[in-house]
Image (spheres, rainbow, N blue to C red):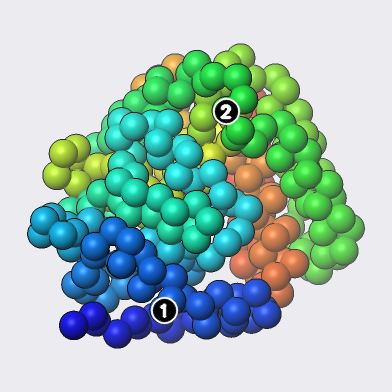
């Protein structure tokens, strides 16, 4: 007997704000049932917590082996996730077992025990090493992509983001300034979004969302990456979220020194220029902060951009 489909509240809250989201939620039981019939699956547990762009739950295959079923809400950032995972072939990331592109559905290898690196209670130095090992595996596997690979260009994508960010800066700049934001950092972040991709010394398929919540403890490898938002471009784009979110050093009084130490350590492990990693930190935090302001949370946006303000002096190779 098939377990009734449970739509977790965090997924419903994220998707029922638009007509497209509501329509997808209405079709979700049918999409899950079709995948179970096609691949002879039984759902054997509740959906995993936290995802707001897809329904993800443990399943059993016909031979009793475990797997994970993922039904994604159709949106551009997720369109190339299966292709990226196939490109990496299990090196540094989970494997795709089956895929139904039209239904935005994948069957994935399980990641057990599945503890995120963020919650693994490991020393920061060890966490950075784990992240660097995974990034080196991902980048080496994708360093020579074939023509017609179909992945989005980082340069073109960041140009679009910069255009949107510039409009948001004009609209929300005064509000953010009232919350302590240096408007000059907005200009700097937007300029870096435009210039960094074109000055990269090499191009790889980056993960795109390499935060420590997307690195899960696994059996065939200490950790594996999930949920990529792939782009082809500068590898220095990827490390920032690991720097900023592993233990959240930005919240500490010695934040500038800690962040610079992490950037230098990761840059050594990844053969990157540390100032480029810092520059991407500014660009990505400015873009994220302006997005938060546009989404109705200028306070959150200001916190994000104050992080960019702290990192900006590191572009000269020195803590602020």
* Position of 315 relative to 146 (above/below): below
The outermost residue toward the left is 64
Residue 109 appearing in the image:
yes
- Where residue 80 appears, as percent x and y from the top left, is 54, 44
- Where residue 213 appears, as percent x and y from the top left, is 37, 54
Question: Which part of the image, by quadrant, shows the C terminus?
Answer: top right
- Where residue 20 appears, as percent x and y from the top left, is 65, 74
At 18% from the left and 59% from the top, the residue drawn is 61
Pick whichever, 208 or 77, lies toward us.
77
Label drawn at residue 105? none
Query: Disc 2 on helix, strand or loop?
Result: loop
In the displayed structure, does residue 190 sit left or right of residue 282?
Answer: right
Pick whichever, 3 or 188, lies toward us.
3
At 31% from the left and 72% from the top, the residue drawn is 47
At 64% from the left and 41% from the top, the residue drawn is 282
Label drawn at residue 149? 2
Pick whichever, 261 or 297, lies toward us.
297
Total tally of numbered discs in the picture:
2
The residue singled out by tag 1 in the image is 29
* Position of 276 relative to 193 (above/below): above
* Position of 130 relative to 235 (above/below): below
- Where residue 208 appears, as percent x and y from the top left, is 52, 42
Badge 1 density bin: few <14, some 14–19, many ≥20, Cα 10 Å: some
Question: Which part of the image, by quadrant, shows the N terminus?
Answer: bottom left
Q: CA distance from mark 2 to mark 1?
A: 33 Å
| Of pointers 2 and 1, the one earlier in the residue sequence | 1
- For the residues labelled 2 and 1, say whether their Cβ atoms are less than 8 Å apart: no
Query: Disc 1 on helix, strand or loop?
Result: helix
């Amino acid at each position: 007997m098939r377990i009734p489909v449970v739509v977790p509240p965090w997924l419903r809250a994220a998707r029922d704000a638009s007509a497209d989201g509501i329509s997808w939620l209405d079709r979700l039981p049918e999409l899950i049932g079709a995948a179970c019939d096609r691949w002879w699956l039984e759902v054997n547990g509740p959906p995993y917590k936290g995802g707001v762009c897809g329904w993800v739950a443990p399943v059993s295959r016909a031979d009793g082996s475990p797997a994970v079923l993922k039904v994604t809400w159709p949106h551009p950032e997720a369109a190339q996730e299966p292709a990226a995972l196939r490109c990496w072939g299990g090196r540094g990331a989970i494997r795709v077992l089956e895929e139904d592109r039209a239904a935005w559905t994948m069957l994935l290898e399980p990641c057990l025990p599945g503890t995120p690196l963020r919650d693994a209670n490991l020393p920061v130095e060890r966490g950075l090493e784990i992240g660097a090992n995974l990034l080196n595996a991902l980048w080496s596997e994708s360093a020579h992509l074939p023509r017609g690979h179909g992945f989005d260009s980082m340069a073109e994508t960041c140009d679009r983001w910069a255009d949107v960010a510039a409009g948001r800066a004009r609209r929300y700049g005064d509000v953010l300034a009232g919350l302590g934001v240096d408007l000059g950092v907005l200009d700097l972040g937007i300029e870096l979004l435009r210039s960094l991709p074109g000055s990269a010394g090499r191009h790889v398929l980056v993960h795109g969302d390499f935060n420590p919540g997307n690195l899960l403890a696994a059996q065939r490898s200490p950790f594996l990456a999930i949920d990529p938002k792939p782009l082809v471009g500068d590898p220095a784009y990827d490390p920032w979220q690991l720097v900023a979110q592993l233990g959240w050093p930005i919240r500490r009084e010695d934040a500038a020194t800690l962040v610079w130490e992490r950037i230098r350590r990761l840059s050594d492990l990844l053969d990157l220029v540390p100032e480029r990693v810092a520059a991407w930190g500014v660009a990505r935090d400015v873009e994220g902060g302006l997005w938060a302001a546009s989404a109705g949370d200028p306070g959150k946006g200001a916190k994000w951009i104050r992080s960019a303000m702290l990192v900006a002096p590191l572009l000269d190779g020195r803590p602020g």
